[in-house]
Image (spheres, grey):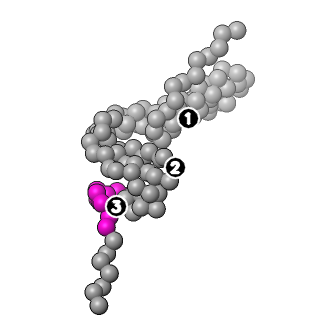
Protein backbone atom coordinates (compact mmCIF):
# COMPACT_ATOMS: atom_id res chain seq x y z
CA UNK A 1 0.00 0.00 0.00
CA UNK A 2 1.51 3.34 -1.03
CA UNK A 3 1.75 6.14 1.46
CA UNK A 4 -0.03 9.41 0.72
CA UNK A 5 2.49 12.28 0.72
CA UNK A 6 1.86 14.81 3.45
CA UNK A 7 1.27 18.41 2.39
CA UNK A 8 4.11 20.88 2.90
CA UNK A 9 4.16 22.70 6.22
CA UNK A 10 2.14 25.88 6.18
CA UNK A 11 3.99 29.13 6.80
CA UNK A 12 1.03 31.33 7.69
CA UNK A 13 -2.36 31.06 9.35
CA UNK A 14 -4.04 31.55 5.97
CA UNK A 15 -2.15 28.58 4.55
CA UNK A 16 -3.18 26.50 7.55
CA UNK A 17 -6.80 27.54 6.94
CA UNK A 18 -6.42 26.62 3.27
CA UNK A 19 -5.11 23.14 4.12
CA UNK A 20 -7.96 22.67 6.60
CA UNK A 21 -10.56 23.64 3.97
CA UNK A 22 -9.00 21.24 1.45
CA UNK A 23 -9.06 18.41 3.99
CA UNK A 24 -12.71 19.09 4.86
CA UNK A 25 -13.69 19.19 1.20
CA UNK A 26 -11.91 15.89 0.49
CA UNK A 27 -13.49 14.23 3.52
CA UNK A 28 -16.98 15.33 2.47
CA UNK A 29 -16.44 14.09 -1.09
CA UNK A 30 -15.28 10.70 0.26
CA UNK A 31 -18.35 10.53 2.50
CA UNK A 32 -20.56 11.42 -0.48
CA UNK A 33 -19.13 8.48 -2.45
CA UNK A 34 -20.06 6.12 0.38
CA UNK A 35 -23.49 7.60 1.09
CA UNK A 36 -26.41 5.34 0.26
CA UNK A 37 -29.21 7.86 -0.04
CA UNK A 38 -29.28 10.43 -2.82
CA UNK A 39 -30.33 13.27 -0.52
CA UNK A 40 -27.31 12.59 1.73
CA UNK A 41 -25.02 12.56 -1.30
CA UNK A 42 -26.45 15.86 -2.55
CA UNK A 43 -26.05 17.49 0.87
CA UNK A 44 -22.45 16.28 1.28
CA UNK A 45 -21.52 17.40 -2.23
CA UNK A 46 -23.10 20.82 -1.62
CA UNK A 47 -21.11 21.22 1.60
CA UNK A 48 -17.92 20.13 -0.22
CA UNK A 49 -18.63 22.68 -2.97
CA UNK A 50 -19.02 25.35 -0.28
CA UNK A 51 -15.58 24.48 1.12
CA UNK A 52 -14.18 24.61 -2.43
CA UNK A 53 -15.62 28.13 -2.83
CA UNK A 54 -14.10 29.19 0.50
CA UNK A 55 -10.72 27.85 -0.69
CA UNK A 56 -11.01 29.85 -3.90
CA UNK A 57 -11.78 33.06 -1.98
CA UNK A 58 -8.92 32.47 0.45
CA UNK A 59 -6.44 31.75 -2.38
CA UNK A 60 -7.52 34.95 -4.12
CA UNK A 61 -7.04 36.93 -0.90
CA UNK A 62 -3.60 35.38 -0.30
CA UNK A 63 -2.44 36.06 -3.87
CA UNK A 64 -3.77 39.63 -3.99
CA UNK A 65 -1.90 40.81 -0.91
CA UNK A 66 0.94 43.21 -1.56
CA UNK A 67 4.33 42.26 -0.15
CA UNK A 68 4.47 43.10 3.51
CA UNK A 69 7.09 43.79 6.06
CA UNK A 70 7.74 41.23 8.74
CA UNK A 71 9.90 41.02 11.81
CA UNK A 72 12.27 38.23 12.70
CA UNK A 73 12.63 37.70 16.45
CA UNK A 74 15.72 35.77 17.51
CA UNK A 75 16.13 34.67 21.11
CA UNK A 76 19.47 33.91 22.71
CA UNK A 77 19.08 33.27 26.42
CA UNK A 78 17.83 36.51 27.97
CA UNK A 79 18.57 38.59 24.89
CA UNK A 80 16.32 39.24 21.91
CA UNK A 81 17.38 40.53 18.51
CA UNK A 82 14.87 42.03 16.07
CA UNK A 83 15.36 42.17 12.32
CA UNK A 84 12.95 43.94 9.96
CA UNK A 85 12.38 41.85 6.81
CA UNK A 86 10.86 42.58 3.40
CA UNK A 87 10.09 39.61 1.14
CA UNK A 88 12.33 37.45 3.30
CA UNK A 89 15.35 39.77 3.03
CA UNK A 90 16.66 41.72 6.04
CA UNK A 91 16.23 45.50 5.90
CA UNK A 92 17.27 46.56 9.40
CA UNK A 93 18.91 44.65 12.22
CA UNK A 94 18.64 45.99 15.73
CA UNK A 95 21.24 45.18 18.39
CA UNK A 96 20.35 42.44 20.88
CA UNK A 97 18.58 43.74 23.99
CA UNK A 98 17.47 42.17 27.26
CA UNK A 99 14.04 40.54 27.03
CA UNK A 100 12.50 43.20 29.31
CA UNK A 101 13.67 45.91 26.88
CA UNK A 102 12.46 43.83 23.91
CA UNK A 103 8.92 44.25 25.26
CA UNK A 104 9.26 48.01 24.74
CA UNK A 105 10.60 47.46 21.23
CA UNK A 106 7.77 45.09 20.33
CA UNK A 107 5.16 47.50 21.68
CA UNK A 108 6.59 50.22 19.42
CA UNK A 109 6.34 47.86 16.43
CA UNK A 110 2.72 46.94 17.24
CA UNK A 111 1.86 50.65 17.42
CA UNK A 112 3.39 51.25 13.96
CA UNK A 113 6.75 52.71 15.02
CA UNK A 114 10.31 51.57 14.53
CA UNK A 115 11.90 50.44 17.77
CA UNK A 116 14.41 52.88 19.23
CA UNK A 117 18.04 52.19 18.37
CA UNK A 118 19.17 52.88 21.92
CA UNK A 119 17.11 53.45 25.04
CA UNK A 120 18.84 55.70 27.53
CA UNK A 121 17.71 56.34 31.09
CA UNK A 122 16.19 59.67 32.00
CA UNK A 123 18.65 62.03 33.65
CA UNK A 124 18.07 62.26 37.39
CA UNK A 125 16.83 65.69 38.43
CA UNK A 126 19.57 68.14 39.33
CA UNK A 127 19.59 69.23 42.96
User: Which residue was labeled with disc 2?
Assistant: 77
- Residue at the image position 70 percent from the left and 24 percent from the top: 35
Q: Secondary structure at mark 2?
A: loop
As drawn, 51 above or below 103 = above
Q: Nearer the viewer, residue 29 or 59?
A: 59
Residue extent of the magenta highlight: 108-120
Outermost residue, right direction?
Answer: 36
Query: Which residue is painted at 27% across and 86% down in the image?
Result: 126
- Whether residue 91 is visible to the viewer of this picture, yes or no, is yes
- Residue 64 is left or right of residue 17, and the answer is left
Position of 25 relative to 76 (above/below): above
Residue 38: percent from left, percent from top: 66, 25
What is the distance, in whole Å, between disc 2 and disc 1 at their CAs? 35 Å
In which quadrant will I find the N terminus? top right
Marks 1/3: CA–CA distance: 34 Å
Q: Is residue 79 left or right of residue 34?
A: left
Q: Earlier in the sequence, mark 2 or mark 1?
A: 1
Whole-percent x and y of residue 107?
A: 39, 61
Q: Mark 3 against mark 2, which lies toward the viewer?
A: 2
Q: Is residue 115 highlighted in magenta?
A: yes
Left or right: 60, with 5 as reference point? left
Q: Earlier in the sequence, mark 1 or mark 3?
A: 1
Q: Is residue 92 magenta?
A: no
Which quadrant of the figure contains the C terminus? bottom left
Residue extending furthest toward the top: 1
Helix, strand, or loop for circle 3?
helix
Q: Residue at x 66, y 20 (%)?
A: 33
On the image, the x and y values in percent for residue 113 come to 29, 59
In the rendered image, is residue 42 in sight?
no
Residue receiving disc 3? 108
Amino acid sequence: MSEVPSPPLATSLDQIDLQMLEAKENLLRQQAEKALREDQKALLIARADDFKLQQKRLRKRIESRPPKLSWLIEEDGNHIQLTRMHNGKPLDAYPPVHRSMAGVYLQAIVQGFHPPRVLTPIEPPAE
